[in-house]
Image: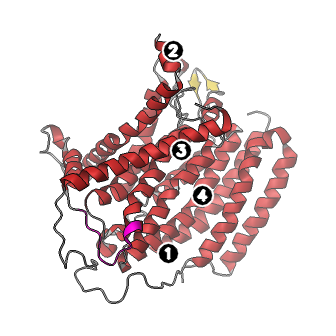
Amino acid sequence: MIAEILGNGYVQLGMKLGVLMILLPATLALGWVELKIGAHMQARMGPMYPGGFHGWAQTLADGIKFVLKENIIPKNADKSVFSMVPYVTMLGAALIYVVIPAGENLVIENLEVGVFYVLAASSIGVIGVLMAGWASANKYSMMGALRAAAQLIAYELPLVLAAAAVAMMAGSLSLVDIVEGQKQIVLAGFYIPFLPFQIIGFVIFLIAATAEMTRPPFDMPVAEAELITGAFTEYTGIRFAFSLFAAEYITMIGLSAFGATMFLGGYAPLHTALEFIPGIVWLLAKTGTILFLLIWIRWTFPRLREDQLQKFAWKVLIPLSLVNIFITGALKLTPWI
Amino acid sequence: MPDGYFGSYLTLAIYSLAMIGLVGGTLGLNRLVSPKVPGKEKMTTYESGVDPIGSGQSQTTIRYYMFALLFVIFDVEAVFLFPWAVVFEEIGVFAFVEMMIFVAILALGLLYAWRKKVLDWI
C-alpha cells in the first residue's frame, strides 16, 4: 500500500517539490549559525535575546520584519525589471538542488549532465544582480553590478576547470555516478573519496565558489562601506531579503552540497561499517563541513582589491587548474589506480 | 508523468514554477501586510544623501572587457573539455595527448595575453 502510494508519479513530484519548503527555513538557520560563529571568532557573544536560547530566533525575527516592511521602488527605476530581480536570483539559487543526490535513488532528477547543469544554474544569479544594477538607475548599484559581473568572468573558469577534473576522475557528469565512483576505492574499510587526488581542485573550488557567491574576502560587489550593498542599494524589505540574503545563503548551501558530492563522497558513508546511517545524514554532515569552512574563510580574511582579485584568478587559479587537469589525466592513465 | 529525456526536464520546469510561486506568494503576503506611505524624498534615488546628478543609467567604461574576451575563449574551451573528460579513459593515451596539445595552445594564448599586459588592471 505504502509502496504503491510512493510509486505514484504525482506523489513523488509532490515530495520533490517539498525540497523547496526546506530552503527558506534552512536560510534562516544558516544565517543564525553564521552570526554565532562569526561572533565567537571575534570573541563576541552574537545575538543572545530573541527566542531565549542563544538568540536562536534572531534571523526568524529578521525575516518577519522584512515581510512587514514597505516595498519602495524608486521613481527613476525601471519598475518591471526592478521587481523581476528577486525571482531571477532565487531561481538561480534553488535550481542547484535539483541534481544533488541524497541517496542512489533519492534525487529530484538525476540529469545526465548534472555537473554542467549546476555550473550553469549557479551563474544565473549574476544576471539578477546585473538586472538590479541597471534597473535601479543608481550609479553605485551599476558599479556593484559591473563588479559582480567581473568577478563571475574571472572565477567561473577555475570553477568549471576544477569540476572538469572531477568529471575525468568519475568518467561521468551525473552526480550519482560521481558519488558511486567515489565508492570504488576502499582502504581498510574506509571509502576514499576524490579529495586526496583532487586536493588542488578542492581548494580551487572553495576559492572560486566563495567568489561566485560574492562573499568576503571577495565581496567587492557588495562592499557595504563604499557601494552601500552594491546592486541592491535601492532594494527594501522582502525584495532585499530575497535578492541578497536568501539567494546568497541558498546558493551557499547548494554549492556546499555540490562540493561535498564532488570531492567528499556525498551520500557515501565514511566507513563500510557505518552503512546503516542513511545517506542524507552523510550528505548533510559533509555539506556542513564545507559550510563551516566558508564561514571560517569569511570571518578571517581581509577583502581583496578589484585588480588583485582579477590577477589572482587569471595568473594563479586558471594556470593551476589547467595543471590540475594534466595531473588528473596522468593519474588516471597510470595503471596502478 | 512522462519519462525519459524530456520527462526529467519537465520536472525541472515544474520545480522552477513552484519556486517562482513561492517567491511570488511571499511578495504577495508582503503586499497585504506592509504599509504603503509613498513620499517625494522616499522615491528619489539614494546616493548617500546627495541629490543624484544625471541619470544612473549612464554609459560606463567597462575596464575589464579584455578579460571578458578571454573568458569567452576559455569558456568555449571548457565546453570542449567536458565531453572529453567523460570518455577519455576509454580512448586512452591518444585522447590525453590530443587534449593536452589543445590545452597547451590555449595556455600559450593566456601567456601571450599575460606578456602583452592584458591581465594587468588598467
Callout 4 environment at 10 Å: few (<14), some (14 to 19), or many (20+)? many
Q: Earlier in the sequence, mark 4 or mark 2?
A: 2
Residue of label 4: A158
Residue of label 2: A4
Q: Residue at x 36, y 73 (%)?
A: A136
Q: Nearer the viewer, mark 2 or mark 1?
A: 2
Q: Are marks 4 and 2 in contact (CB under 8 Å)?
A: no
Estimate the spatial distance between the alpha carbons at disc 1 and disc 4, rounded to whole Å.
17 Å
Q: Chain of mark 1?
A: A
The lab-note entry on whether marks 1 and 3 share a chain reads: no
Can residue A49 be seen here? The reply is yes
**A78 magenta-colored:** yes
Q: Position of residue A59 (x, y in %)?
A: 23, 47
Secondary structure beneath label 1: helix
Q: Which mark is residue B13?
A: 3
Q: Position of residue A48 (x, y in %)?
A: 14, 45
Q: Are marks 1 and 3 in contact (CB under 8 Å)?
A: no
Q: Earlier in the sequence, mark 1 or mark 4?
A: 4
Residue of label 1: A307
Q: Residue furthest right?
A: B94
Quarter of the rendering containing residue A30: top left
Q: Residue at x 30, y 66 (%)?
A: A235
